Image (tube, rainbow, N blue to C red):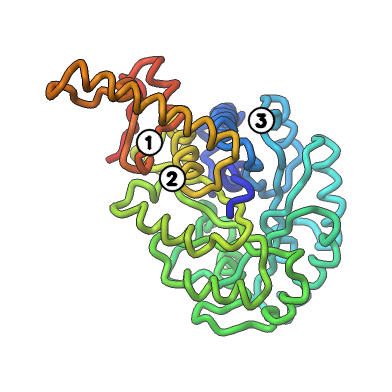
């Protein structure tokens, strides 16, 4: 089941947010506030998490606090890879957490921590054991990145490959399992730390590893899983078929579900890191995914049930008046699209009142 939704991934890293187009993160802040409010209206049971930051930067959290973002959230999250990319030693993990706690009263999660086997698998094993020693009992959620190595045929999600130099290739050695599914030295010891340690595993569209991944997660005793649904992928043909398969396969775990990646057709520039033209579109995507995959809160179930009865009665009355001439008379002002699974987005409801000319989602 989904226990939390995370808005974006590493928003202070240019590999995931084009802050050259949004240097003060004002667009990101407005987008996140709108999405958080929409998700809360749809399902107040879900925890709302700020996209895990990388690098760990107190100034960014203070910025989000100053813009009112944290007032709409329940948790902030951080990512750290001190043995691979960060400029601080692994033993400073508690200090890094404390720095964030000094500028916010929200709990801090570590939604990505890991160590590559790029130099040696023994280094990864050390990184696992030391990270577990430092973080268990210190934060409520710890997601180890990752279960699988990134296949070499797939590009790493980064916009600074040239700056990384040889460190770029560390992206392909972060898994407890090699690309071919064979175990590394750290795999078996990882089970010693579950369920305290969870896993962060991204699944690409129509990912062939999904079923095997679920099997390994069970064998390792994983309870907490972080993954994502890509807004950009939602425009692909048969997107819902893949999303349904992925979320059904993962329903036994307590999932932190990350929403990120701008469709090219919706961005200020045609790139997945771009701020969107219309902030409501991201909020709509988040709500549709929550409607489809999250267990509804009891209050929301009662409200939706009452709305459905009311709408049915309104439709019946309209049909009696119009007879065979009646076409789409139920909720005529509401914006609907195929990805909603036949449900209405509360954001779209609000936008329809503001003007349907601005409410359309640019799916192309």
Quadrant of the snapshot with the N terminus: bottom right
- Report which residue position mark 1 lands on: 266
301 to 116, vertically: above or below: above
Q: Earlier in the sequence, mark 2 or mark 1?
A: 2
In screen coordinates, is 244 left or right of 302? left
* Residue 23: percent from left, percent from top: 58, 31
Q: In percent of the image, x 60 and y 45: which residue is there?
A: 6
Q: In percent of the image, x 56 and y 30: which residue is there?
A: 41
Question: In the picture, residue 310 is in which quadrant?
Answer: top left
Question: In the picture, residue 88 is in which quadrant?
Answer: bottom right
Instruction: Report the Cα–Cα distance between label 2 and label 3.
Output: 21 Å
- The residue lying furthest to the left in this view is 324
Callout in the foreground (3, 1): 3
Callout in the foreground (2, 3): 3
* Residue 50: percent from left, percent from top: 65, 41
Callout in the foreground (2, 1): 2
- Report which residue position mark 3 lands on: 72
């Amino acid at each position: 089941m989904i226990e939390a939704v995370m808005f974006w991934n590493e928003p202070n890293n240019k590999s995931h947010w084009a802050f050259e187009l949004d240097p003060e993160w004002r667009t990101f802040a407005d987008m996140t506030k709108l999405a958080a409010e929409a998700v809360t209206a749809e399902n107040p049971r879900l925890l709302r998490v700020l996209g895990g930051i990388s690098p760990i930067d107190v100034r960014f959290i203070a910025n989000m606090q100053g813009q009112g973002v944290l007032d709409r959230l329940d948790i902030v999250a951080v990512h750290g890879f001190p043995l691979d990319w960060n400029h601080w030693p692994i033993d400073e993990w508690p200090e890094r957490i404390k720095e964030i706690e000094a500028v916010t009263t929200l709990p801090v999660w570590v939604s990505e921590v890991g160590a590559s086997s790029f130099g040696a698998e023994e280094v990864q094993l050390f990184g696992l054991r030391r990270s577990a020693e430092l973080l268990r009992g210190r934060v409520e959620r710890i997601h180890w990145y990752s279960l699988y190595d990134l296949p070499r045929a797939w590009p790493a999600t980064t916009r600074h490959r040239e700056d990384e130099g040889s460190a770029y290739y560390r992206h392909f050695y972060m898994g407890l399992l090699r690309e071919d599914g064979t175990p590394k030295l750290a795999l078996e010891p990882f089970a010693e730390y579950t369920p305290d340690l969870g896993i962060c595993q991204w699944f690409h569209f129509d990912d062939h590893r999904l079923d095997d991944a679920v099997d390994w997660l069970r064998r390792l005793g994983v309870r907490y899983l972080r993954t994502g649904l890509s807004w950009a992928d939602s425009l692909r043909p048969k997107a819902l078929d893949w999303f349904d398969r992925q979320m059904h396969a993962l329903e036994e775990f307590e999932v932190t579900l990350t929403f990120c990646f701008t469709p090219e057709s919706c961005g200020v520039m045609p790139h997945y890191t771009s701020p969107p033209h219309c902030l409501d579109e991201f909020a709509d995507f988040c709500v549709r995914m929550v409607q489809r995959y999250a267990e509804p809160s009891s209050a929301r179930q009662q409200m939706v049930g009452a709305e459905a009865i009311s709408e049915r009665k309104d439709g019946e009355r309209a049909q009696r008046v119009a007879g065979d001439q009646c076409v789409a008379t139920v909720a005529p002002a509401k914006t609907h699209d195929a990805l909603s699974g036949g449900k209405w987005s509360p954001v779209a409801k609000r936008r329809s009142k503001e003007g349907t000319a601005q409410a359309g989602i640019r799916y192309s």
